[in-house]
Amino acid sequence: MSPKPRLLTILDAVTIALLLVATVGVFFYAPTELVMGLVQKIFYFHVSAAWVGMLGFIIAAIAGVLYLRTGGRNWDLVEMAAVEIGMVFALITIITGSIWARPVWNTWWTWDPRLTTATIMELVYAAYLMLRQGIEEPERRSRFGAIYVILGAISVPITFFSIRFSRTIHPVIVGNGDPTALGTFDMTPKMLQIFMFSLLVFSIIFADLLWHRVRLGKLADAVEQMKLKLIQ
């Protein structure tokens, strides 16, 4: 495997520094929401994680299209990496949402449209991993995986728009929504600044993790190719 690129090392350091700055900003710069109190601060991590989760699934679909068009192995690695990262952050979204919901909604879980569709989206991509594990032939596995993530990407807009087209208690932060939704709030300028900064930081985290995962995928691919040669 090629040595770790210097640019990636720099990106690692920048990512860690920005995450620390964002965390300090959340707890010491952004004001505490008057009604929900300190628990509202999880919002910055919750929404940012949701953004990264959906971004990962969309990028995976784009990589799937490019793989089908070009047959390039690197696109398959990007697809796989993006799905795995997207699943991790989607799970973080569900967990942080439950933590936020407990004091605000008085329950850890409710079958609200957003929670339900987010869970289904997570399961859709868990099935993608199972599909890939069940196919041994590399080219066939990559082709079927690409088709699956393209179709699976339909779950992303469904999840995003679920609280805009359905009656829900989930607050709508971006775009028009029900102002009476339980847990909704208006952001002050400082809240908005930290919110946008958190989205940027989590996007950089995604890019950093994606680069690392693709490099790891190349190493795993090389090992698999060596095994196939030994079998032949």
Image (spheres, rainbow, N blue to C red):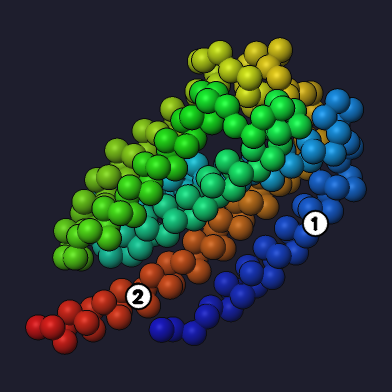
Residue that carries the numbered disc 1 in the rendered image: 21
Residue 42 in sight: yes
Q: Amino acid at mark 1?
A: Val
Residue 61 appearing in the image = no
* Picture quarter with the C terminus: bottom left
Report the side of 125 relative to 23 (left or right). left
* Callout 2 amino acid: Ala
Q: Secondary structure at mark 2?
A: helix
**Relative image position of residue 172 (x, y in whole percent):** 64, 23
Locate the N terminus by quadrant.
bottom left
Q: Which mark is residue 197?
A: none
| 219 relative to 203 in the view: left or right | left
Q: Which residue matches tag 2?
A: 220
Q: Is residue 52 left or right of residue 156?
A: right
Q: Check disc 1 and report its element: helix, strand or loop.
A: helix
Residue in the image at 90% along x and 48% along y:
28
In the figure, 199 relative to 179: above or below? Answer: below
